Image (spheres, helix red, strand yellow):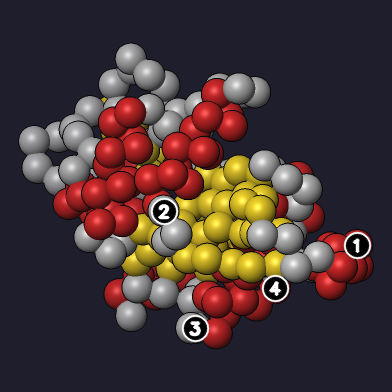
Amino acid sequence: MDDVSFPDPTLAEENGLLAVGGDLSVERLLEAYSNGIFPWFNEGDPILWWCPKERFIIRPEKIHISHSMNKFMKQNEIKIMFNRDFADTIHRCRTKREATVGTWITDDMEKAYIALSENGFALSVEAYTNNELAGGLYGVVLGKCFFGESMFSDKENGSKIALIHLAKLLEKNGFSMIDCQFHTDHLESMGGEKISWEEYIELLKYVYT
């Protein structure tokens, strides 16, 4: 890929792989996300670009807050910050995963998403419980769409609190979706749902609003 364009997303392989190579420039990342494409690769591998046909999203207005979660938030002092320190949040996401299941958040990925943040296209959310940093998440913001990338928890329910308050903010501002990319049981418990490519494309139109 010599320019920042991508193949037609519908040409992705069955596993979602669409293209190989290119770079992680702000321009290319914006082109990717606006077409439902995202990078995901291991350290030392070429950049791999993915566009799964079946998508997993959370509609902000349908975020699920369990009874126990509601109780927890009432019993603890909760504070939410947005873009407190984007670089710190993405690095915490990286180190938390490195210590457990491994991570795709390489040095180059950190630099790329920090650049998106500096240009106003990425957001971090940090949750505090009783004045201590409990967890957070980060993702890409285009128009009225939020593309979630990773999250971390240092204390009980840290990432859940961050996600709940992000969803409330996005709902208030008319966002169409939180794109979770892939299914996890954790995200399903928070209100995530699988949708078809056709449904996803309709929601993706909010990138341009």
Q: Secondary structure at mark 2?
A: loop
The residue located at (9%, 42%) in the rendering is: 3
| Badge 4 amino acid | Lys
Q: CA distance from mark 2 to mark 3?
A: 25 Å
| Badge 2 amino acid | Asp
Determine if residue 1 is in view: yes
Mark 4, other Cα within 10 Å: few <14 / some 14–19 / many ≥20: some
- Where's residue 118, x and y in %? 25, 57
Residue corresponding to mark 1: 68
The residue located at (75%, 52%) in the rendering is: 157
- Nearer to us of marks 4 and 1 is 1
Mark 4 and mark 1 residues within 8 Å of each other at the beta carbon: no
**Mark earlier in primary sequence (4, 2):** 4
Residue corresponding to mark 3: 174
Q: CA distance from mark 3 to mark 4?
A: 13 Å
**Left or right position of 4 against 120:** left
Q: Is residue 128 above or below residue 154?
A: below
- Where's residue 207, x and y in %? 35, 70
Q: Which mark is residue 85?
A: 2
Residue corresponding to mark 4: 62
Mark 3, other Cα within 10 Å: few <14 / some 14–19 / many ≥20: few
| Badge 3 amino acid | Gly
Quick one: which residue is furthest to the top in this view?
A: 44
